[in-house]
Structures are given as structure tokens and as C-alpha cells.
Image (cartoon, grey):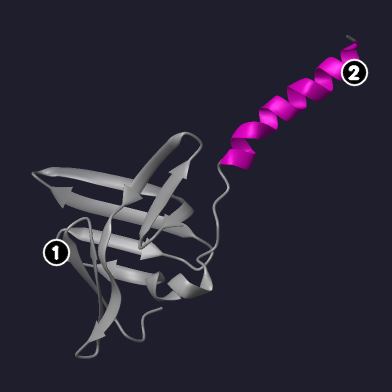
Amino acid sequence: MTLKRISHIFCLLCMVPFISSCGIPVPADKIDYVGEWKSKAMYLLILEDGSVQYKRLKGGATTEISGPIKEFQGDNFIVGVGFIKTTFEVSKPPYQEAGVWKMVVDGVELQRPIQNR
């Protein structure tokens, strides 16, 4: 193998983590997920480009996740970079009630104002 060929293979291997970390934009049929969702113990921000920021307080511990959406599976969505990923279980997808958007994620009811997207 030549040095040039080895350097090409090395460059390709170095690119794999960056390619696998790319997320997807929120699809048109899931656009209602986009926005800033809140409850007393959870914060979830979903941007149209598929970026997600999440923070939850539970049992005295704080969990924080930031990353791109990798895919939607039904109403659920998977966020992660490379091999590290988290599934957000959506038992009630976004719906409107009394002038407020609501969604239930991981058993927590989240809200966002209708104009907040």
C-alpha cells in the first residue's frame, strides 16, 4: 500500500464520526413538535433543523442532553451523536387544548404557548 492510499483511508475513517453524528430536520408531518416545551421538572427545545436541548430534574438529579434528532419512530424520536443515543417516548404527540400546545414525553406533560414556535 502506498503512503497516499494509507492517508486516504485514514481521512475516510476520521470522517465516519462526523457523518454518523448528523441529524435530520424535523419532517413536515412532525412540525408541531418544534418549539420550547416546559413543565416544572422538564425543559425540551426542538428546533426545525432537528437540534434538541433537554433538561430534566428527577429524584434530586439533573439529566441534560443536547444533540440532533437521528430519527422518528412513530411518535417517538431518537436524539444522539454517534453510538450514544436516547429515545424520547411520546405517549401523546402535540395537541392543542385551551390555547396551549401540550405533549406528553417520558410520562411528563409539557406545554408551550400556541404562538411559541
Q: Residue at x 55, y 57 (%)?
A: 24
Which residue is under mark 2? Answer: 4
Question: What amino acid type should be assigned to the residue bearing mark 1?
Answer: Lys
Quadrant in the rendering for residue 30: bottom left
Location of residue 78 with respect to 99 vertically, above or below: above
Q: How many marks?
A: 2
Which residue is under mark 1? Answer: 40
Q: Where is residue 90 in the image (x, y as percent from the top left)?
A: 28, 61
Location of residue 65 with respect to 3 vertically, above or below: below
Q: Is residue 32 left or right of residue 16?
A: left
* Pair 1/2: label in front: 2
Q: Where is residue 7 in the image (x, y as percent from the top left)?
A: 82, 19
Q: Which residue is drawn at 22% across and 55% down?
A: 106
Specify the quadrant that holds the N terminus. Answer: top right
SS category of the residue bearing label 2: helix
N-terminal of the pair, mark 1 or mark 2, is 2
SS category of the residue bearing label 1: loop
Q: Where is residue 56 in the image (x, y as percent from the top left)?
A: 21, 52
> For this rendering, which residue is in front, 108 or 43?
108
Question: What amino acid type should be assigned to the residue bearing mark 2?
Answer: Lys
Q: Which residue is drawn at 41% across and 71% down?
A: 34
Q: Distance between the residues labelled 1 and 2?
A: 57 Å
Q: Which residue is drawn at 44% across and 44% down?
A: 80
Q: Residue furthest top?
A: 1
What label sits on residue 53 in the rendered view? none
Magenta range: 2-20
Quadrant in the rendering for residue 40: bottom left
- How packed is label 1: few (under 14 Cα within 10 Å), some, or many (20 or more)? few
Q: Where is residue 62 in the image (x, y as percent from the top left)?
A: 20, 45
